[in-house]
Amino acid sequence: MSATAASKPASTRRGVGVYAGLTQERIIEAARSLDPDELSMQALARELGVDRKALNHHVSDRETLLALVAMDAFSETFSAVDIGRHASWQDACRAYALGFIRSAIATGSLADHIRLTDSYVTDVLEPTEAVLTKMVAAGFSDEQAMRSLSLLTNISLGYARDAVLRAKSGVAPRAVILRGALERRDRADYPTLSRIADLPVTTYDDHQLHLSINIFVAGAERQLSAAETEGLSSSG
């Protein structure tokens, strides 16, 4: 062995696959220590001191990695959301939505990568079970409760992503886009849009949030009332 080879320090990189000693938990912990905007499979491999290929046994690509990190951060907060035992189904839905939104916003730029279809959904079952139980007890069918909560979840995630985008950009994107589009056209052809575009109103504030939740609750109440009326008619 040459002197050069003898003096060269041994590589700290580990092998691939199961021999790298990796677990999904260890990968996520390391990934959360990195800036989400700079997170990549190669950057994570360096952080863990393993070969890039070792990660493939647990995470297939960057998008999957970001989704895992996002859901880990989201579930950490959302799993603690408390749906009061004596709360009405309406208040339970409000608590669920507000807790969901706060948890999603807390993930920052990872909000766009929250996916409610992977294994981390199991960490947020308690609030979901609590709301569905309230709704079914109030008279919603299982299907109505499921569809309604799915809608509320989509409303909540959409608002959270909007809030994160506005915080990151410093502007209200929809208003900027609308005004920019109108500047390239004759405003006389779009009188309603032009009038609305000039309003000192933002659709990214708490007023918009509570309006969205209240409209959801009102719609769900109407659906429940219609189902009850239909049930009485059929039984009569």
Image (cartoon, helix red, strand yellow):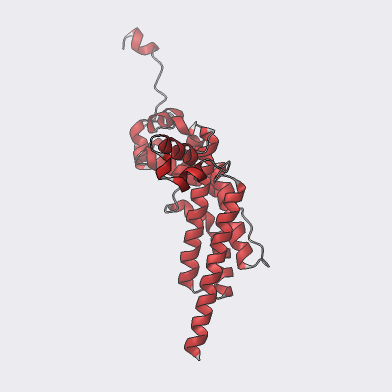
Vertical side of 232 occupied by 122: above or below: above
Q: Is residue 130 left or right of residue 1?
A: right
Task: Count the marks.
Answer: 0
Q: Position of residue 155 (x, y in %)?
A: 50, 54
**Residue at x 61%, y 62% (from the top left corner):** 92
Residue reaching furthest to the bottom = 236
Residue at 45%, 71% (x, y): give it: 143
Q: Position of residue 205 (x, y in %)?
A: 59, 45
Q: In which quadrant of the rendered image does the N terminus lie?
A: top left
- For the residue pair 185 and 155, the one nearer the viewer reads as 185
- Report if residue 24 is visible in the image: no
Q: Residue furthest right?
A: 86
| Residue 229 seen anywhere in this rendered image of the structure | yes
Position of residue 121 measured from the top left corner of the image (x, y, whole percent): 48, 54
The extreme front residue here reads 188
Q: Furthest-left residue in view?
A: 1
Work out whether residue 103 or residue 225 is closer to the camera in this orientation and state it. 225
The residue sitting at 47% across, 60% down in the picture is: 150
Residue drawn at x 48%, y 70% as measured from the top left: 144
Location of residue 38 in the rendering, given as x and y in whole percent from the top left corner: 44, 29
Instruction: Name the one closer to the observer, 200 or 39.
Output: 200
Q: On screen, 232 above or below 179?
A: below
Q: Where 46 sits versus 19, above or below?
A: above
